[in-house]
Image (cartoon, helix red, strand yellow):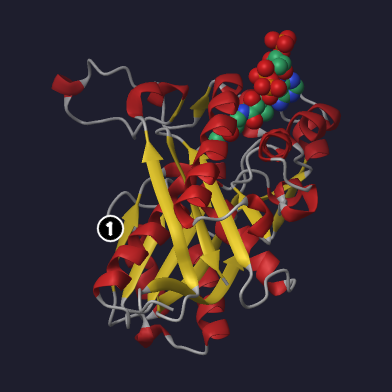
């Protein structure tokens, strides 16, 4: 209770497309099996968007739920920060489309690209705004329709990803609750282990850059190794930063990329499995949406009580990674 302003969650929300795509259906699309997908990734189903379920609509749906939980209206939002790599438009930002859909006329809005770490980066940025003005109400969203960005002939990637959105409405708190530690990292040197080209350019002078198509490419085995190491080290960093141990933490929400990554983290951090929230079986890897989706589910399930310590960690293309601790 030192008067420091921390980012405090007023409400959470999520939104998922209706269509469920099962592993059995994927067996008919590429050379794969339910057994391989379930044992190698932990994924059983994922959601796939249809008409009216573009990234901005999912994001707005999640934001509406967060507003409702907070007892506020769209006019109360000062900033919309949206982590995504799969907006339906390159310009304007997806956040501006969300602003329009919500009628958040008093906000300014922009997107942030940190791939699967996008939500945690956006939350970290919200914290900086709130240190400047604790009264702000900031809608932090992670939203993706990666079904529009995978090569549906590539079994290495198409079985992994899903669509969805999650949101948190945050404001400043000075009573000791809220974000008590946060640290983001990136390293562009290995960008091509997990990447996606832009749409083909119109300037032939720039064509020396080898554009391989605007869909996700990944060397999964290498990404896996980096993901485990990076998330464990980010978790250790924020625990040290806040003078806490993993025993003090009530719930850990890691980016949902692979159940085997989660299991490796459990071993390395020496933490009981029950402390780690997992929903990858239902939704697959939803990139920037994965942490806020899980957070909303955990919140609605009553997994978080006032005063509990929540630790979130992410890893994604860039590479980008980070971890955050919030006192609920
Ligand atoms: O969200 C951002 C961060 N992303 C991640 O953290 C993802 C990290 N990576 C992973 O989750 C895993 O590496 C994958 C799930 C992508 C792959 O699992 P893996 O155990 O690393 O498999 P692998 O790439 O080493 O491939 C093993 C075998 C290969 O066959 P051979 O060469 O051993 O004959 C693949 O061709 O599995 C094969 N394989 C498949 N088989 C059936 C790859 N994809 C499939 C598939 N179905 N869908």
Viewport quadrant of the C terminus: bottom right
Label 1 neighbour load within 10 Å: few <14, some 14-19, many 20+: few
Q: Is the C-beta of the residue carrying label 1 under 8 Å from the nearest atom of ligand 1?
A: no
Element carrying mark 1: loop
Residue 125 appearing in the image = yes
Answer with left or right where residue 98 lies relative to residue 158.
left
Residue, x 36% and y 47% (percent of image)?
A: 113
Q: Nearer the viewer, residue 325 or 22?
A: 325
Instruction: Residue at the far right: name it.
Output: 35
Q: Nearer the viewer, residue 296 or 267?
A: 267
Residue, x 77% and y 38% (percent of image)?
A: 42
Residue 52 appearing in the image = no
Q: Regarding ligand 1, which quadrant of the image does it lie in?
A: top right
Answer with left or right where residue 83 lies relative to residue 49.
left
**What residue sits right under mark 1 in the picture?**
92
Residue, x 85% and y 29% (percent of image)?
A: 35
Q: Position of residue 259 (x, y in %)?
A: 73, 38
Question: Toward which corner of the image does residue 158 lie, by quadrant?
Answer: top right
Q: Is residue 257 above or below residue 67?
A: above
Q: Position of residue 127 (x, y in %)?
A: 36, 65
Viewport quadrant of the N terminus: bottom left
Q: Is residue 216 above or below residue 222?
A: below
- Report the number of discs: 1
Q: Position of residue 204 (x, y in %)?
A: 17, 22
Q: Position of residue 85 (x, y in %)?
A: 42, 45
Question: Toward which corner of the image does residue 134 lie, by quadrant?
Answer: bottom left
Q: Nearer the viewer, residue 132 or 300?
A: 132
């Amino acid at each position: 209770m030192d008067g420091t302003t921390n980012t405090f969650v007023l409400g959470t929300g999520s939104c998922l497309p209706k269509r469920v795509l099962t592993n059995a259906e994927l067996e008919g699309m590429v050379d794969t099996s339910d057994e391989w997908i379930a044992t190698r990734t932990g994924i059983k189903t994922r959601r796939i968007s249809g008409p009216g379920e573009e990234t901005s609509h999912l994001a707005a749906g999640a934001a509406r739920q967060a507003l409702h939980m907070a007892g506020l209206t769209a006019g109360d939002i000062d900033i919309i920060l949206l982590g995504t790599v799969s907006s339906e438009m390159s310009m304007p930002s997806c956040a501006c489309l969300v602003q329009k859909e919500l009628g958040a006329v008093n906000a300014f809005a922009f997107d942030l690209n940190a791939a699967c770490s996008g939500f945690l980066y956006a939350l970290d940025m919200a914290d900086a705004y709130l240190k400047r003005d604790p009264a702000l109400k900031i809608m932090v969203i992670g939203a993706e329709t990666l079904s529009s960005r995978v090569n549906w002939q590539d079994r290495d990637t198409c079985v992994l990803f899903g669509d969805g959105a999650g949101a948190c409405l945050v404001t400043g708190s000075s009573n000791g609750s809220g974000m008590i530690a946060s640290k983001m990292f990136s390293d562009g040197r290995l960008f091509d282990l997990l990447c996606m080209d832009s749409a083909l350019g119109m300037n032939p002078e720039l064509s020396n850059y080898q554009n391989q198509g605007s869909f996700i490419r990944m060397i999964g085995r290498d990404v896996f190794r980096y993901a485990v190491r990076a998330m464990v080290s980010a978790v250790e960093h924020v625990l040290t930063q806040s003078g806490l141990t993993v025993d003090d933490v009530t719930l850990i929400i890691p980016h949902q990329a692979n159940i085997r990554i989660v299991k490796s983290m459990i071993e390395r951090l020496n933490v009981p499995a029950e402390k780690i929230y997992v929903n990858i079986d239902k939704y697959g890897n939803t990139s920037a949406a994965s942490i806020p989706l899980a957070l909303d589910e955990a919140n609605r399930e009553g997994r978080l009580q006032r005063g509990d310590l929540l630790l979130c960690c992410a890893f994604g293309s860039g590479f980008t990674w980070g971890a955050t601790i919030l006192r609920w």
